[in-house]
Image: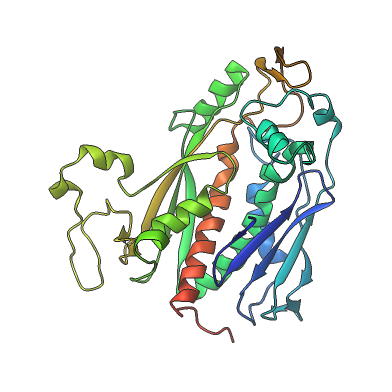
């Protein structure tokens, strides 16, 4: 399915080299001021070609509002937004049609959909669709800021290096791609968001985060390091009735519910699968393995573009939870 959320429901659609990609937000409260300018900062942060190590493919990524907006404010009806695809080079993908790219969805999509999938640029599996997630995040963050809830993400390391430039240089020297780790913090959350077990905050955020292509792991608070700690060391001592704790090894979530401290988690981003390094894959026409290298425009390190996307999906989850708890005020 291509939809996420209960009350703040987001559906994304489109393909990498199709006419456009887009989203529908159902459940956005009426009266939220919204304009093209609101989207520019975050869509620019997501773009390739802006920073070293990202794909040279450039799109304007200016939102086109199709429904749910009237006189500059949301109407309460489903909000539909399109982003045009204008800078495509589909011929790069025709050459490798018979050889599925390792690490991509080429092989699984081909078998699942019987060869009818749009394979150009990865089709519906492409990171191009993350612009839709970013757009949903723009709306969600604008709703949350009314409650002084802030969400920020930053790169922790690239290619195993804390020095981002050094990590990128490793990839350049190797003529290959590298992964990275991105951290996210949400501050100002009320106590009580989330439900135990299946709708725990960790469960919902993890679900949304794994919709981001290239995410391979997630940890909250101390994360995997907790496995090497004593319980008395890992437990966060409560200091007052506002829920403030001396440490935050839990990452702001206890029992699947926010505890009033900062929500903190990190995600692992795999190296970009498309790399100029020569590789081996199966030719599904000849049924033989053969060597090939991937041409086209690709990211040296996809992690560079993840922070704003991570903020967006986190905002989507928190907005939905706030609506479920009836904590979002009516917009005047």
What colour scheme does the image use? rainbow
Q: From this viewpoint, is residue 55 visible? A: no
Residue 258 placed where, x, y %? 34, 65
Left or right of 80 on screen, residue 241: left
Q: Residue furthest left?
A: 232
Measured as percent of width and height from the top left, residue 272 is found at 61, 31
Evaluate whether residue 15 shows in this view: yes
Residue ID at (76%, 38%): 114
The N terminus lies in quadrant: bottom right
**In this orientation, which residue lies closer to the viewer: 195 or 35?**
195
Residue at far bottom of view: 332
Residue 252 at x, y percent in the picture: 32, 59
Q: Is residue 210 above or below residue 149?
A: above
Query: Residue 166 versus residue 282: which sits nearer the camera?
Result: 282
Q: Where residue 147 sits: x, y (%)? A: 46, 75
Q: Residue at x 76, y 47 (%)?
A: 15
Front residue of 104/223: it is 104
Please indicate whether residue 35 sits to the left or right of residue 10 in the image. Answer: right
User: Residue at 83% across / 40% down in the picture?
Assistant: 88
Residue pictured at 56% horizontal, 57% vertical: 312
Residue 97, located in which quarter of the rendered image?
A: top right
Screen quadrant of the C terminus = bottom right
């Amino acid at each position: 399915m291509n939809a996420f959320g209960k009350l703040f429901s987001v559906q994304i659609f489109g393909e990498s080299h199709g006419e456009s990609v887009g989203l529908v937000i159902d459940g956005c409260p009426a009266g939220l001021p919204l304009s093209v300018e609101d989207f520019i900062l975050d869509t620019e942060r997501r773009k390739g070609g802006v920073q070293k190590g990202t794909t040279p493919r450039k799109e304007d990524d200016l939102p086109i509002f199709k429904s749910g907006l009237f006189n500059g404010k949301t109407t309460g009806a489903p909000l539909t937004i399109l982003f045009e695809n204008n800078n495509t080079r589909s011929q790069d993908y025709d050459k490798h049609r018979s050889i599925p790219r390792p690490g991509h969805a080429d092989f699984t999509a081909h078998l699942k959909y019987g060869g009818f999938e749009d394979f150009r640029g990865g089709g519906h599996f492409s990171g191009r669709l993350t612009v839709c997630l970013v757009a949903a995040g723009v709306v969600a963050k604008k709703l949350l800021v009314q409650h002084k809830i802030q969400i920020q993400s930053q790169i922790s390391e690239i290619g195993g290096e804390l020095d981002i430039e050094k990590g990128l240089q490793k990839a350049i020297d190797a003529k290959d791609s590298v992964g990275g780790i991105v951290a996210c913090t949400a501050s100002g959350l009320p106590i009580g968001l989330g439900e135990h077990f299946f709708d725990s905050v960790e469960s919902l955020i993890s679900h949304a985060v794994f919709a981001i292509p290239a995410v391979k792991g997630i940890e909250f608070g101390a994360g995997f390091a907790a496995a090497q700690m004593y319980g008395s060391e890992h437990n966060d001592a409560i200091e007052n009735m506002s829920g403030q704790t001396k440490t935050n090894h839990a990452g702001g979530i206890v029992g699947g519910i926010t505890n009033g401290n900062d929500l903190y988690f990190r995600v692992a981003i795999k190296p970009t699968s498309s790399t100029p390094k020569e590789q081996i894959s199966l030719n599904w026409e000849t049924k033989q393995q053969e060597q090939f290298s991937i041409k086209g425009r690709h990211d040296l390190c996809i992690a560079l573009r993840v922070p704003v996307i991570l903020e967006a999906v986190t905002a989507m989850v928190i907005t939905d939870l706030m609506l479920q708890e009836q904590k979002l005020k009516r917009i005047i």
